[in-house]
Amino acid sequence: MAEAIVFYGLAALILGFAVLVISTRNTVHSALYLVVNFLLVAMLYVMLGAEFLAAIQVLVYAGGIVVLYLFVVMLVNLKRPPETHQDPRRQTRLGLALASALLAELAAIIVYSATGESAPAATAAAAAGADIAGGNVEQIGMLLYTNYLIPFEVASMLLLVAMIGAIVLAKREL
Amino acid sequence: MPAGFSAADFYNILPELVLTGGALLVLIVDVLTARQQRGLLAWVTLGVLVATLLALLPFSDVNTVASRGLLAIDGFAFFFKLVFLLTALVTVLMSSSYIEVEGLRAGEYYFLILCATLGMMFMASGIDLITIFIGLETMAVAFYILAGFLKPNRRSNEAAVKYFLLGAFSLGLLLYGMSILYGLSGTTNVRELATVLASQERNALLIVGLVMVVAGIGFKIAAVPFHMWAPDVYEGAPTPVTAFLSVGSKAASFAMLLRLFMEGLPFLADMWQPMFWVLAVMSMTVGNLAALTQSNIKRMLAYSSIAHAGYLLIGVVANSSRGVTAMMIYLLLYVFMQLGAFAVVVMLRRQDVAGDELKDLSGLYFRYPTAAVAMLFFMLSLGGLPPTAGFMGKFWLFSAAIESGFIWLAVIGVLNSAVSLYYYIRVVVFMWMKEEALGSPIVASPSMAVALTVALAGAVVFGVYPRPLFELAQESAQSIGGVAAAVSALSF
């Protein structure tokens, strides 16, 4: 019960800050709201017993990524307010209507399925992870270097592609 | 070697290993050679692709699961890998002269082409949501960069940014859908997903997950209403990249779609068949109608490729082994006709001519008869006139639909093919009946000539003698599980 209260509290805060990130006009404030958002998500990981992921979330996202954002905000001049769109094809109202319809549908389905049976899958997933002994870091390491070795290695190629892409696109003359 | 891995696990991904090593080799050769000798890089890339193809051949009738159930090495994967490598080969052949004219960086260009191919190969053989997603991401990131490779060109910048932003959003949707599927089943393995979800009571959340996944994949195959990006990106990207994007990325996304829906969610067919029915009809109709008014060849081919995504979705809706076979045949034929058409467009790009407007084709027959005749074949083939390859492909797709009871879908498909003939024939009219366009003479480099010959040979030979292709596709389609069990009684 207490767990549920903490979870719903956290979820509400996460959503609230996510809305603040996109609704505030000041980009620095927006980035700072994002930090809070990341920290709250890290707490969600702690609740799920994934302390290592929580630490990584704080280090990489709250630490690294947001600092990058702030650098970009400082380097790019955003003093000038963004121009309002004059494009008649923007169809904001239609978009808003469609988005609200989607939201209503999602909410209805979630409420409907929550009143039904509880998810049996979570226990299955927990059981699948439990056969590897050891601490959190050890477990993740074992999974990454045994079961998920191939995706792990492909991810390294993905990062190489991204790195080379950044150089190609950003550097004026190679 | 990690516990639980054997030498066989590494042998099974030999083609991927060769390709990865080759991609890195291209980067190294790029650094080691002088600027004037960069033409060498195209040869190295071709060598890498041929080596990968040779490494792939022993797997033609292997059917096994590798690296702890993450990859399926089967006929289905073999066929699609063949398609990707063929596409990459023809793309590289048509790129070399274009790179010179545009003054692009050859090393990174070829590296990214190879990495995109690598991602596609993992998408085709992945039977785990994680492998499939990582493969998709590798391919997508390579394409985001390739789309923006013409740095001084504003349209190319726009293409890259648009493709990146919309692509990231759609990947988010896909990932959200996948996470819901994982949450409901507790497994990321596609084959386990089928058994676990089949034994459960149907959860309403499953629909949400399904819709998200359909939307994510719909973006990748450029099906209406997720197609908005395609015309702008196809127009702005460098032409050989557009060719590669419109064939390779589409084929890989269809491979992923078949794996996910036919192997992972076959028992939900009564839910996803209507969705794909609507997508197919909308893609065919909107794509063909929008293509009618285009004056830019690349935009026209973009809308035509949206329409082709619609035709291909007919095979998904049919949800039968025959439908899968028809889709695979069509995809391979599409490689030849679409790449061939783009090869001619690449030829039109000269020092002084951008060459992507319809009027640039004017009088092509009198300036370069062979290119005009080849283009004629590609256009008729894309339009689906007999006796070309496109006709055979469409014939199989429509007959698969009829066999599964989707007669109206086949009728709409035939009507759409008739509409599409108008804009394909218009290209022919420009080539034969208009005044010659200005600009320097059109020449084909030797590698371009080879690319055109390969594409033309494929489009002609398989139109007249499709039997070997049909047998290969039929055999490859066998290995995709659960198809027979999933044929549902649903019909419109």
Image (spheres, helix red, strand yellow):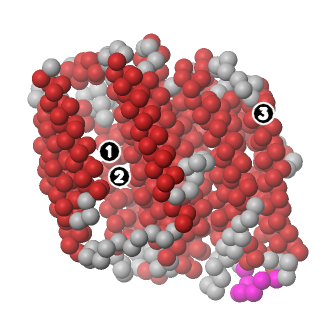
Mark 2, other Cα within 10 Å: few <14 / some 14–19 / many ≥20: many
Mark 3 and mark 2 residues within 8 Å of each other at the beta carbon: no
The residue tagged 1 is A153
Give the letter of the chain under mark 1.
A
Residue contact at pointers 3 and 1, CB within 8 angstroms: no
Q: Is residue B367 left or right of residue A151?
A: right
Q: Was residue B168 drawn as part of the magenta stretch in this picture?
A: no
User: Mark 2: which secondary structure?
Assistant: helix
Of A172 and B164, which appears nearest the observer? B164
For residue B457, say whether it is visible.
no
Give amino acid for label 1: Glu
Q: What's the residue at 44%, 65% (across, down)?
A: B161
Residue at point 32% right, 45% down?
A: A153
Kindly check if marks 2 and 1 are in contact, taking CB atoms under 8 A apart as contact. yes
* Residue carrying label 3: B408
Q: Nearer the viewer, residue A117 or A174?
A: A117
Neighbours of disc 1 within 10 Å: few (<14), some (14-19), many (20+): few
Of the residues shown, which amino acid type is indicated by label 2?
Met
